[in-house]
Image (cartoon, rainbow, N blue to C red):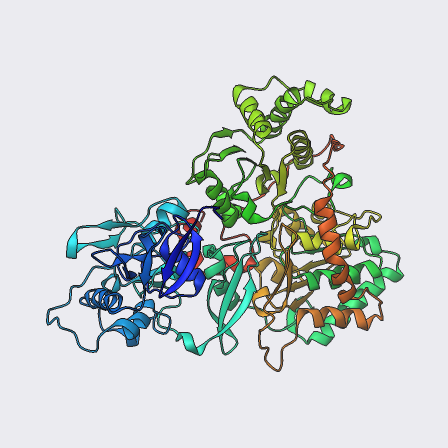
Amino acid sequence: MSDNKVNITIDNVLHSVDAGRILIEITDELGIYIPRFCYHKKLSIAANCRMCLVEVENSSNALPACATPVTDGMVIDTLSNSTKTAQQSTMEFLLINHPLDCPICDQGGECELQDLAYAYGKNNSRFDLQKLTKPNDDLGPLISTDMTRCIMCTRCTRFGSEVAGIQELGTMGRGETSNISTFIKQTVNHELSGNIIDLCPVGALNNKPYRYTDRTWEMDQIKSVSPHDCVGTNLYMHVKNNKIKRIVPMQNENINETWIADRDRFGFDGIYSEDRLTTPLIRTNGTLTNSTIEDSRRQLNAIISSLIQSNKTDKIAALISPSVSLNEQFIFSNYLSQLGIKNIDHRISQVDFSGDTLDPLFPHLNIELKTIGEMETIFVIGSDLRRETPLISHWVKKAADKGASIHFIDIALREYHFPITDYMISDTESLVENIGLVVKAAASIAKMDVPQHIQEQLNNLTEPTVTHNQIARLLFTKTNTLLLNGLVSRSHSDFSLIRSYINILASLTNSNLGELTSGANSVGAYITGCIPHRNLLGQSSEPGLNALEIASSHHDLLILYGLEIDDCLYDQLLNEALKGSKKVVVFNSFMESVINEHADIIIPINTAYESKGSFINLTGQVQNFNQELLMPNNYYSNEELLMDLVNERDLEIPNFNDFINDLESFIDQSIANRNYIKEFPVKASNSSPVVTTNTFNMYNIDPILRRSKPLQQTKESQSNT
């Protein structure tokens, strides 16, 4: 807030406000409503709709509140006849060419034009002219267009240039021939493109999959959280008759502002896939036949009992999805732990586990997400940032737009729509060395003694280049700096060494540090003990098999919970593990062909969209989702299923509420205690590269997205098929 205050009068009431602020911002804070179309607090000022005209003393004409800075002594009247006449006249002009199709418009019930026409419009039109029509563009499978409804507010075009960073839409023509369109015939493909649907104040841009399905007032609004990445984007699910009809953003200035990624908006369609699993299946005489939850549960416990009695606990292994809820992870991990089963992991996109002994209690970002936008220098290591975490890429862009220096080291040149200071492209093998050279450059700049074992490792590297030195120097000279370790690094065969280098660099430069993780709840998986070397709340345990070892072995019993073959980086190995294991039990929401071929028991579970629970995002924030969801009478939750497994064996697992009570302080202390890794992993010399057939795109990272028809029709998905 500014120390320079001025006095202004609004509707005969004196207010002391910051000098130079825009009038409409002040009236919004004071609860004084001024109508608007083009103004949006997250976008630049356009002042082209003129709906916010208000009377200002000593001004010959009404002034737009969205473009008028306040000055000392200004007198504003938002209720005068002059203001009312100006706003009514603006509305009259806007409605000259607007079609009378409100009964079939999807915007009906939440249309800003409809609301303001009722409040500021006239009952009769003075214009007896033929209405203009405008052509509609095909913007792709996600956004429908009815451009005759467009009032040229330009919110969508400003979103493209200012938020997305790519102007896919623009204003064409002049005067009455003006139109919003693509510059050349093309679709809108940005990963945040669906936000223009929310920004459009009329029915010109709409949700294409939702088109002509339901009315807004018929649906219940449920607070939820995205299950597709580690950001924890806040959502509203619009539900009718226990079916999701659409998803829109829920404002959270600390996480996602007012934006959501397209996969968060349209991904839910996958839960209504034709191969949805609804009935438990048990293999009998080589064929899967319908069963009951009770029988499938009893058979699983019977298999486990037989192996425990035969002292073959080490022949039991489990992989769990990093995107299932905290509640499920807690019960599942404790169920196996109480049975003495230690072979459990969720890190299905990681191949290097040599640094497990150096593992943090959980990977995290030690600042709030919104703080990324305030950084002066950001160094992104091994990350396809726009596709891995679109909202974090958005925050990085905000920092870049404010003048921050952005630096990348990656194995490919990727498209980013913000200024980048340095972009180092390295082959996969040289990625580690390039990161090490930045550390070496930083060590030479640092005015402190570097531990001998670290210095010896750095001495084995070549000399840093000008770019390495520049990145290191900026990390030292700037106050607010951030290192982001991405999913390309996490899937690298030398991930542990990369992580050690980055931790050492963060320690030398006093930088903030963040690790991106796969799935919506990897942090929860670490904390609940869904890893082979830790128990609940980070307690060390006798290590079991990690995810790669599980996928590389044949087991007497292999359990998959909430994941499929295509979720795993080493899909071929896991396929062979399924074939070679004596018994395979799968908890899944869908029928996958490989699972259908090799599973002995298949138990249906609900997706995150259909259940209540919690996720922990990469900043350590615990977020509950779907708490207002109304369940049908025959609803059987995943937690009930897992607790029935526990109770059938008379096991005593920790109380979940006690765990939640301890969780917040555990997370806060862990993040506040910056114990950077200053050791190097012991790398096995006989490790061999892992072969994968998976091709990454942002719409194939989990079973739900792979089945979402709108997303699979996008350019992103089509280019990878």
- Relative image position of residue 128 (x, y in whole percent): 10, 72
**Is residue 538 visible in this depiction of the protein?**
yes
Query: Would you place residue 12 above or below residue 461 in this image?
Result: below
Between 85 and 394, the one lying in front of the other is 85
Residue drawn at point x = 67 percent, y = 52 percent: 523
Q: Nearer the viewer, residue 134 or 158?
A: 158
Q: Residue 563 occupies which quadrant of the picture?
A: bottom right
Taking depth in this image into account, of 366 and 342 the one nearest to the observer is: 366
Left or right of residue 452: residue 283: left
Residue 440 at x, y percent in the picture: 64, 22
Q: Position of residue 472 (x, y in %)?
A: 58, 26
Number of labels in the image equals 0
Residue 423 at x, y percent in the picture: 49, 30
| Residue 254 or residue 142, whichever sits in front | 254
Is residue 582 shown to the viewer in this render?
no
